[in-house]
Amino acid sequence: MDFLFNSWQLAGWASELPEHGVLARRLLDVPVALFRDAKGMLHAIHDRCPHRFAPLSMGRLEEGRLICGYHGLAFDGTGTCVDNPHGPIVSALCVTSYPVREGYKGLWVWLGDPALAQDAALPDFSFVDATPDTAFSAGYIHGEGNYQLYVDNLLDLTHVDYMHPTSLGGGSITRTKPIVEQDGDRIAIKWHPRNEVPSPIQRGLLGLTDPDARVDSRTEVYWSPPSAIALITAVAPAGAPRPDDGARAIHILTPETANTTHYFFATTRGFDVENLEVTRQIATARMEVFNTEDRPMIVAQSRLMAGQDFWAMKPVLLPIDNGAVRVRRKLEQLIAQERKAPDASLPAAPEVEATAEA
Amino acid sequence: MDFLFNSWQLAGWASELPEHGVLARRLLDVPVALFRDAKGMLHAIHDRCPHRFAPLSMGRLEEGRLICGYHGLAFDGTGTCVDNPHGPIVSALCVTSYPVREGYKGLWVWLGDPALAQDAALPDFSFVDATPDTAFSAGYIHGEGNYQLYVDNLLDLTHVDYMHPTSLGGGSITRTKPIVEQDGDRIAIKWHPRNEVPSPIQRGLLGLTDPDARVDSRTEVYWSPPSAIALITAVAPAGAPRPDDGARAIHILTPETANTTHYFFATTRGFDVENLEVTRQIATARMEVFNTEDRPMIVAQSRLMAGQDFWAMKPVLLPIDNGAVRVRRKLEQLIAQERKAPDASLPAAPEVEATAEA
Amino acid sequence: MDFLFNSWQLAGWASELPEHGVLARRLLDVPVALFRDAKGMLHAIHDRCPHRFAPLSMGRLEEGRLICGYHGLAFDGTGTCVDNPHGPIVSALCVTSYPVREGYKGLWVWLGDPALAQDAALPDFSFVDATPDTAFSAGYIHGEGNYQLYVDNLLDLTHVDYMHPTSLGGGSITRTKPIVEQDGDRIAIKWHPRNEVPSPIQRGLLGLTDPDARVDSRTEVYWSPPSAIALITAVAPAGAPRPDDGARAIHILTPETANTTHYFFATTRGFDVENLEVTRQIATARMEVFNTEDRPMIVAQSRLMAGQDFWAMKPVLLPIDNGAVRVRRKLEQLIAQERKAPDASLPAAPEVEATAEA
């Protein structure tokens, strides 16, 4: 179980939670039900009735309480049973409640020790809040394979030159030595190609028609544990001042189980921000690339690994893996620390305090 | 393996057996082929050729003998090989034959010790035989999940108030304390709501239009081990004499494997018995409710249990579980007795005598 | 793992390999990629990049080199990395290459010790090369079940009388005692029915209309380890000289995994060899019979065996099993020898020399 429990996991985009409904997602192999109470406050509780183990998310939400669809027990957002039509409410009639935060248009859940659930542990995606809604689009795909394979994919962006040659790749990432920086538990990998062949997408962005045109560009990934990534890209004609108003994207890989992954992504941009048609085109192209190019390769890779440990398989690592390997080592270290912690209380005990929304 | 072998298992409705064909069903994880001999007598034999393990049910029935579709060995209803086109019939060329009974329009098979297969062990559903064919309808669905989850569902009928609010539920079962009675190995649970809100179906049956109308009703389940249930319901306007001519239904849960269940059901009634349109409506509504409301919940519950033992998961039991828990304890006791029996011969030895039809 | 590694495995028909592409097949549970180099020479390499375990077959073939679709590493037919866009080519950057042969319109791979891969170990299907293309047709189906169940099926051809009564079976194979011959590791089983009822297909071949017509025929199977079979059939009116120009077919069962099988088949004939319509009819009828009659029975048999060992299940063997049992015993003996061999090097080490095409 290579999960970091003491961390914020993105459970879904806010837009995925129905207005008066429930969002059910398995996170770190734990079934979770997300819903809002009568005041609109977000809650996440264990999605399994303590009576006969029905998923509470199959019930109905009434005045902010989730009512089991099997025998009618009602739970509030703290996981406390607030109605038992069949007798007294004994103390055991409760489910675990998980700390939640809303932020960056996402719904975040903390599956680990609730005492450690601090705002500061959220990754910094404040650029989302600074972006007009018209320049924001989010998406989600579900993928077979361990989440770390999806993280690896994003940390070694030379892959765009081979996997995405008709869109994102033009060879410049491969030809550029990345800078790897570490800031506490966060790791950044930056490519700054100069006077390089543009990718098909860069060519389109700049409206280049000259086949010999060259560009300067920036591609930077910022990883926060366990699996949240900001990806910043910008491009300009070679020699021109580099623009600061490129695209800033989010890629978040939330483990569903050890072998399946929720892949959330979103894109913001600093140019042409009122143009909904551009926003739509980005969303469509992004979904096409992830669905037909990245995902099939990662699924195939996962099947060839057949459940074996990555290191036990003795991968032949290359210089391009420096960043991804540092991330794997950092994450392994954090998971090992978490397991050794003397006050570890995982999985979280059911007596969780009510949790506030961010 | 939580199966009671020494018991009659419903293998199918008589109507499911093709006139000159074979019904193949896995029962208690044993593949069984049912067919009739030339005199019309029912037989059940192990559905696996002793030669190369082909399913005999994939062969053809000829003059009451089942002929393997792979190499032509023929077996009669006692499991004896009666034709070997390739040489002598050695004693090992036989398959186990299982005691069978026909009754209540069903085909019953005894997978345990054949010496113990007595008529008296059949549950009493004699009301079926007393019902005109025009007032009888039967059905079958296949469901994921252990059969005891399906039994639990039927023994705590408060669930109709939450799972079936647009048909069977009106709240009266929840508001009525049940009577639990035990008669040897059989357990009955009875709800007798008085002056209560009618369910949508009760409202329809009585033609009630007054929203404040109240009814008296009877809902009684009779469980016989291992998993045969009679369900009797009747309704009348509040204060009127209670009718004896309500509906009597059968619900039988035959384990296919440890994690899949054959769910057989049938309904008879004592009113309007010539009306085939009513019979058809009951069959359609029943299938809709079971398929779209009960089964998805039990499948979800089974997946959340993920193969764990029910008691090991420490369910928080409620007063409404009294009947279902007594049934679980009784069944556990019977299974434990069966395993301890000094003359236990499970699985049944192949030298089984020919068995007679009920 | 009941595989014989030191043997030629048919990986596919030559027609299955795209002209400038890759054929990916799992053989003996090993992922293999087949492709041709710039000179047209065939190669087979381990289909898993040593870098991050992506299937190389998902990449692209360029100038006879297979380029990984994830990060662009290029491998030649010897499994040597010939291009690393990201740094030096270290010695570990290689994959296993397997000896290959082309022959009988098929692509053969040797998964075992490459030092033992000799032409002489190929089964003799030289009749294929002596047949005009117009009289040759090949096919492939994928089947659930261990490959030995498919081999058994072909070695006891009495099954045609029961499984294929409307095409291949007329009863004569059942009524004829076969001759079983052993020549070193090869085993032949021959049926020579005289003055017998023709099968529907024999009736059609000879244009027989008289229901009492009788025929002489020949049906001979020649098994070579581990699972390559030649099947020769011929028919003539009873008493006439037996023709030598019947049909010669190939049936090859290559294990994909322990529980799935690649079933390759091909037919040649010595009559009407220019008639493509006859060739097409044979291919269509053969696919229909294998897909709808043989395969479903073997899949069902495999499921009833549920992973148990064939002998441990104590099959009741008949005289018709003599040939198939001798084959099983011979194969078991060869596999046991292979495992005991002091110089056994299985799975093959990655330092395999480049291999030549036959």
Image (cartoon, coloured by chain):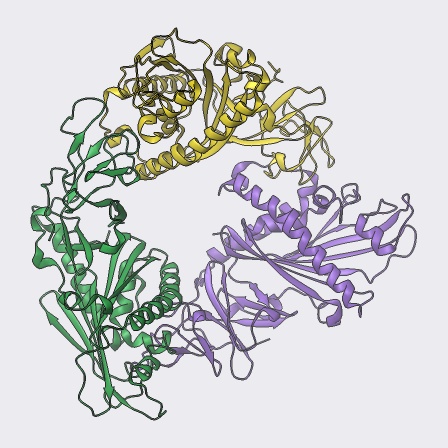
Chain colours: A yellow, B purple, C green
Position of residue A252 measured from the top left corner of the image (x, y, whole percent): 46, 23
Q: Is residue C142 left or right of residue A256?
A: left
Position of residue C264 measured from the top left corner of the image (x, y, whole percent): 27, 60
Instruction: Work out whether residue C40 or residue B190 is closer to the camera in this orientation and state it.
Output: C40
Q: Is residue A145 visible?
A: no
**B59 relative to C170, above or below:** above
Q: Is residue C272 left or right of residue A156?
A: left
Instruction: Work out whether residue A249 or residue C305 is closer to the camera in this orientation and state it.
Output: A249
Residue at 80 percent across and 53 percent down: it is B218
Residue at 61 percent across and 17 percent down: it is A355
**A154 relative to B188, above or below:** above
Numbered circles on residues, count: 0
**A224 relative to B195, above or below:** above
Q: Is residue A95 left or right of residue A295?
A: right
Q: Residue furthest top?
A: A241
- On the image, which quarter does residue C191 sit in? bottom left
Residue at 83 percent across and 53 percent down: it is B204
Instruction: Work out whether residue B138 or residue C37 is closer to the camera in this orientation and state it.
Output: C37
Q: Is residue A211 left or right of residue A9?
A: left
- On the image, which quarter does residue C245 sit in? bottom left
Position of residue A209 measured from the top left corner of the image (x, y, whole percent): 38, 22
Q: Is residue C260 visible?
A: yes
Instruction: Work out whether residue A101 or residue A318 is closer to the camera in this orientation and state it.
Output: A318
Position of residue B4 measured from the top left corner of the image (x, y, whole percent): 52, 57
